């Protein structure tokens, strides 16, 4: 479903059937804490709500944090 307005809905859950918690205006910054993989990816934000948007509307800021690779324990003799 397209949104003809100039804002992005931030919802209480990952889907358009969830209530809107906040409206994000053009230029607003949010921190993505988690990406869900339901039928389509939704971004859980530091505002405690979910957004879904095309990459045309999102601008990456900052550094991608990756999980460190597990290491084998060292054997000390």
Image (cartoon, rainbow, N blue to C red):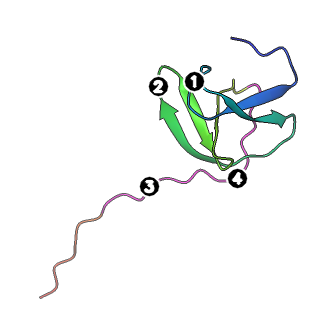
In the rendered structure, which disc, 2 or 3, sits on the residue that comes first in sequence?
A: 2
Instruction: Please tell me whether residue 52 belongs to the stretch shown in magenta.
Output: no
Determine which residue is flagged by label 3.
Answer: 67
Label 2 crowd (10 A; few <14 / some 14-19 / many >=20): few
Within-10-Å neighbours for mark 1: few <14, some 14–19, many 20+: some
Tag 4 residue = 62
Q: Position of residue 64 (x, y in %)?
A: 59, 50
What distance separates the C-alpha of mark 2 from that of mark 4?
A: 25 Å
Report the disc number at residue 15. 1
Q: Earlier in the sequence, mark 4 or mark 3?
A: 4
First in sequence: mark 4 vs mark 1: 1
In this rendering, position of residue 59 left or right of residue 75: right
Picture quarter containing residue 10? top right
Residue 30: give x, y in percent of width and height: 73, 46
Q: Main secondary structure of the magenta part?
A: loop
Image height check: is 25 above or below 73?
A: above
Q: Could you tell whether 66 is left or right of 22 in the image?
A: left
How far is mark 4 from mark 1, CA to CA? 26 Å
Q: Residue 20: where, in percent of width, then height?
A: 70, 30
Q: In the rendered view of the protein, which quadrant contains the C terminus?
A: bottom left
Location of mark 2 (residue): 38
């Amino acid at each position: 479903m397209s949104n003809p307005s100039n804002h992005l809905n931030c919802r209480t859950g990952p889907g358009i059937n969830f209530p809107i918690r906040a409206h994000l205006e053009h230029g607003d910054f949010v921190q993505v804490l988690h990406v869900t993989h339901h039928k389509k990816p939704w971004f859980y934000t530091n505002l405690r709500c979910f957004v879904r948007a095309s990459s045309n509307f999102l601008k990456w800021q900052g550094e991608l944090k990756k999980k460190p690779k597990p290491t084998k324990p060292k054997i000390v003799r």
